[in-house]
Image (tube, grey):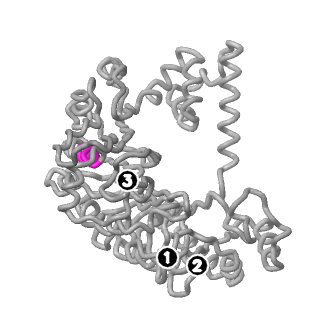
């Protein structure tokens, strides 16, 4: 199977819109919805295509609909931490525990309070408040540790991406928040020191320690992973926890400082990424599905010239990996080497908004497709998704309009061919600014590679190879 998606799928959008309209009509007019005549299982499958608010609307149509979508509405227990004192977690769990199958934690960290100019720096630091809150602290800890709702096997944790905009004491030497919180590299002595001094560092370690104590989870999803090491990652409990995982989903934090500098230009960001294979990836030896997502302002995947933040994977990591998802990743030699070393286990490769560097010393899209075609033995599914078609003219990447007036003659020709033949793809090439870390789209390189045709040729060969493999598997 292969998939190419350019932008949002209009057919799915139209289908969702028509379902939503049908739901609204049934709700407003009090009519019996045609959906109610369908088998319950089919109603549930249809509801999975809807946005969460539409599922809630569907549940209001009738008791039939409510029963059909109830498990979708309450399958995930989402807890914002610290927990609001007014939230009755115990009551909610008692009522819906049979429906809950996933746990999601939204973590909101904060700086130390400003203690004023008269504060004596020699005074003992106050203890960091628990990230779980006060009134429900024990309940939340027991949930995260798997003592309550022990049947849950999927855990996700999201760190608030906007928290570092808050003024306060985030670090020893840096009064400016944002990405500068991650400016310095740290050895383990400094990690321990800062965890004892700064509330948010202690709370991060609290999160990881409690998660590591859960013996039931085999699927972990981390959103906005903060580029700071934690002493919890040195414990045997953390290593054992990772060793039980089968599904790992990691997206890294990224941002800019308001003046153009991106997170991946901070030395502390680089230092953190280089330690991830040792602290996380090497212990996840049973993982069969990995999703790795970089932030557009926290780029992963080094190039031969100016961008040196590596892919946080070593060739020996995850020897049983079958499914690989990469998003917003620079597809350099590290990616090709990782695929090469997993050639006999990989079955699916999914690429979303990834890019190649324009340099001749770095792999092209054709190099990637050729490698997958020639080296892998079991890959049967490849998906390639671009939310936006790469630009053909200067400034096109900054707006939704197509600036055909700015097209060169070559650009006009390429645009015409793409419109006439939907099987053709414009492959994305970029370069990374050395000073700020900005990613610049390379319109001329996009056109040149399209005209040469090697990327399209190797991709077509790969699709043919995948088709042959599927036929043999029947």
State which tag comes first along the sequence, 2 or 1. Answer: 1
State which tag comes first along the sequence, 2 or 3. Answer: 3
Residues 287 and 322: in front is: 287
Camera-side mark, 3 or 1? 3
Residue closest to the far right: 405
Residue closest to the far top: 30
> Which residue position holds label 1?
373
Circle 3: element type: strand
Prevailing secondary structure of the magenta residues: helix
Q: Position of residue 428 (x, y in %)?
A: 62, 71
How many neighbours does mark 1 have within 10 angstroms: few (below 14), some (14-19), or many (20 or more)?
Answer: some
Q: On screen, 409 above or below 155?
A: below
> Which residue position holds label 2?
458
Is residue 1 visible to us here?
no
State which tag comes first along the sequence, 3 or 1. Answer: 3
Q: Residue at x 41, y 71 (%)?
A: 309
Q: Residue at x 32, y 68 (%)?
A: 271
Q: Position of residue 450 (x, y in %)?
A: 69, 78
Q: CA distance from mark 2 to mark 3?
A: 35 Å
Q: Is residue 81 magenta?
A: no
Q: Position of residue 288 (x, y in %)?
A: 33, 58
Is residue 47 visible to us here?
yes
Answer with the quarter of the image where residue 258 lies: bottom right
Q: CA distance from mark 3 to mark 1?
A: 33 Å
């Amino acid at each position: 199977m292969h998939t190419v998606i350019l932008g949002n799928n209009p057919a799915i959008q139209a289908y969702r819109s028509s379902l939503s309209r049908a739901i609204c009509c049934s709700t407003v007019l009090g009519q019996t919805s045609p959906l109610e005549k369908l088998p319950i299982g089919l109603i549930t499958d249809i509801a999975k295509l809807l946005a969460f608010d539409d599922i809630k609307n569907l549940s209001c149509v009738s008791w039939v609909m409510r029963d059909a979508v109830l498990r979708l509405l309450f399958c995930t227990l989402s807890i914002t931490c610290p927990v609001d004192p007014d939230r009755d977690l115990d009551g909610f769990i008692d009522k819906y525990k049979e429906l809950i199958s996933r746990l999601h934690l939204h973590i909101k960290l904060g700086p130390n309070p400003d203690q004023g100019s008269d504060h004596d720096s020699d005074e003992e630091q106050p203890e960091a408040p628990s990230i779980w809150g006060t009134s429900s602290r024990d309940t939340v800890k027991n949930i995260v540790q798997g003592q309550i709702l022990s049947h849950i096997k999927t855990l996700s944790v999201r760190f608030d991406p906007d928290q570092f905009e808050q003024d306060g004491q985030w670090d020893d030497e840096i009064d400016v928040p944002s990405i500068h919180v991650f400016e310095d590299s740290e050895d383990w002595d400094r990690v321990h020191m800062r965890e004892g001094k700064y509330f948010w560092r202690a709370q991060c370690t609290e999160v990881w320690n409690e998660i590591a104590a859960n013996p039931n989870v085999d699927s972990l999803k981390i959103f906005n992973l903060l580029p700071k090491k934690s002493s919890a990652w040195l414990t045997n409990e953390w290593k054992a926890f990772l060793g039980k995982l089968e599904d790992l989903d990691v997206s890294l934090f990224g941002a800019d400082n308001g003046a153009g500098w991106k997170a991946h230009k901070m030395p502390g960001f680089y230092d953190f990424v280089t330690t991830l294979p040792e602290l996380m990836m090497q212990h996840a030896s049973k993982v069969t599905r990995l999703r790795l997502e970089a932030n557009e302002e926290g780029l992963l995947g080094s190039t031969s010239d100016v961008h040196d933040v590596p892919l946080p994977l070593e060739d020996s990591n995850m020897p049983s990996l079958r499914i690989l998802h990469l998003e917003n990743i620079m597809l350099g030699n590290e990616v090709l080497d990782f695929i090469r070393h997993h050639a006999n286990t990989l079955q699916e490769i999914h690429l979303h908004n990834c890019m190649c560097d324009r340099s001749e010393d770095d792999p092209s899209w054709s190099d990637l497709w050729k490698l997958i075609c020639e080296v892998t033995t079991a890959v049967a599914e490849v998906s390639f998704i671009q939310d936006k078609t790469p630009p053909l003219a200067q400034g096109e990447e900054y707006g939704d309009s197509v600036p055909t007036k700015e097209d060169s003659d070559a650009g006009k020709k390429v645009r015409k061919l793409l419109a006439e033949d939907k099987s053709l793809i414009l492959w994305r090439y970029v370069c990374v600014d050395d000073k700020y870390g900005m990613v610049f789209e390379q319109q001329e390189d996009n056109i040149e590679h399209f005209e040469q045709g090697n990327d399209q040729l190797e991709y077509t060969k790969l699709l043919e190879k995948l088709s042959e493999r599927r036929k043999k598997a029947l």
